[in-house]
Amino acid sequence: MSSFWNKQKAASFCTLFLTLACGLDWAHINVVSIYVMWAIQLCYLVVAFSAYEANRFEAKDNSLLKIYFVWVFLSIVRGALFYTLGNYWIWKNWFYGSFDVLLPALIYLYARPEILSSILRTWLKYVPFLVICLLPFVSRGAYHFFLAPIYIMAFFWPIYSGKWKVIILLLMLLMLGADFSARSQVIKAGFVLFFSLLYLKRRFISQALLKWMHWIFYILPLILLFLGLTGRFNVLEEVSRNQGIVVTKIDRHGKAIKEDLSSDTRTFIYIEVISSAIKHNYVWEGRTPARGNDSAFFGTFNAEELKTGLYERHSNEAGLLSLFTWLGLIGLILISLIYLRSSYLALYYSNNIYIKILGCFVAFRWGYGWIEDMYDFTPMILGLYMVMAMCLSKTFRRMNDNEMKGWLLSLVGGKK
């Protein structure tokens, strides 16, 4: 019992600390040491692995997660042995990347309703106050990085009443309308509100429609990726061909810049990532978490200012591309199967509408991961793995609508 209670407290503290650190980072208040951050991340991962219980998952899911972690550990060891010797900055990247590729371990922790409930209750107790304190200092386009766990409740805001309904909707509207040039923030918040409308009109929404949307989120990106790689059609170039809405925004250095919301900022990243993998022959096995992809655009700082001699970029905004660079096509396929398995189980093998809607969101996040979803210890990614864990968890999927509603209401001390 004591061990279980310690897991709850440790996980709740780590989530809250990482939220605070993320907010402070975006507010340019650099008071958290990198070594403290690594210690917190390591603690979180240790607690997550120690929370593993085989009966929480189907046998196939246990096997899939184990295969992924075996491949990850082999990549981490390979990176330490072959790339990091004698270079501080590559060692630093190795630490960052190694922790990031181990993030799916949090599924073991979040799959337990009692632990996830404790984490979210603690988070909800303190984060609204944190938002009030940091709001004047944080870039308006960065709110989703440390507010994303609110998504779990925002999907189902109609079930809440009083102040919590107001708080949830205000935070969602803040992310949706604070900065339209922050395209990813607006798109993610927009989809959450869209799914909440599906919940609101659930009596008129067929299960077939949800399943159809689920598969579209997987199939469409693959089609577009194939067309782009073969040179037949690049949707990013097509969208940016004509000038869209031009806005003026303030960058992180306080300088006013004009930005076209339809501009293509991803095609050249795809070119650099894929060209690097082919050139150095790591398409299948990856370059390990210690290294990044060759980058003429971003690599100058690493090579010349940090004196690494390597014109590389360690991670990219499109998170799936970072995983491809670190773990290769094998690792990318394995993490994609974890996404697919969680969303598939949610849509086809759950007893409540709540998990089915969350499954659709997992599928959307995989599709959007080809555009932007940076894999690191931000609440944005922690929130994603919370949703994935709920979809994979037999306990969550076995709940009926009333039981799941009761669990969601318990997060704010309510009753069904």
Image (cartoon, rainbow, N blue to C red):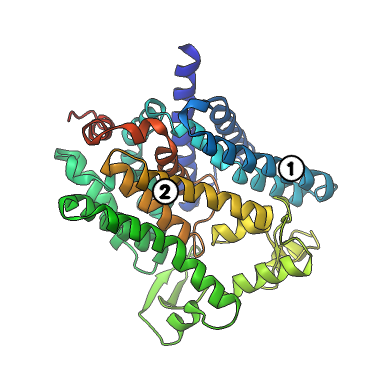
Give the Cα separation between the discs numbered 1 and 2.
27 Å
Asked whether residue 137 appears in the rendered view, the answer is no
Side of 365 where 304 appears, left or right: right
Mark 2: which secondary structure? helix
Question: Quadrant of residue 120 in the image?
Answer: top left
Query: Where does residue 325 sit, x and y in percent of width and height?
Result: 67, 58
Residue type beneath disc 1: Leu
Quarter occupied by the N terminus: top left
Q: Which residue is mark 2?
A: 343
Residue that mark 1 sits on: 74
| Residue 148 drawn at (x, y percent) | 38, 48
Using the rendered view, name the quadrant where residue 163 is placed: top left
- Residue positioned 46% across, 83% down in the render: 238
**Quarter occupied by residue 270:** bottom right
Most foreground residue, 204 or 328: 204
Residue shown at the point (49%, 23%) measured from the top left: 7
Amino acid type, callout 2: Ser
Q: Secondary structure at mark 1?
A: helix
| 281 over 205 or under it: above or below | below
| Residue lying at the far top of the rendered structure | 1
Near-viewer residue (394 or 278): 394
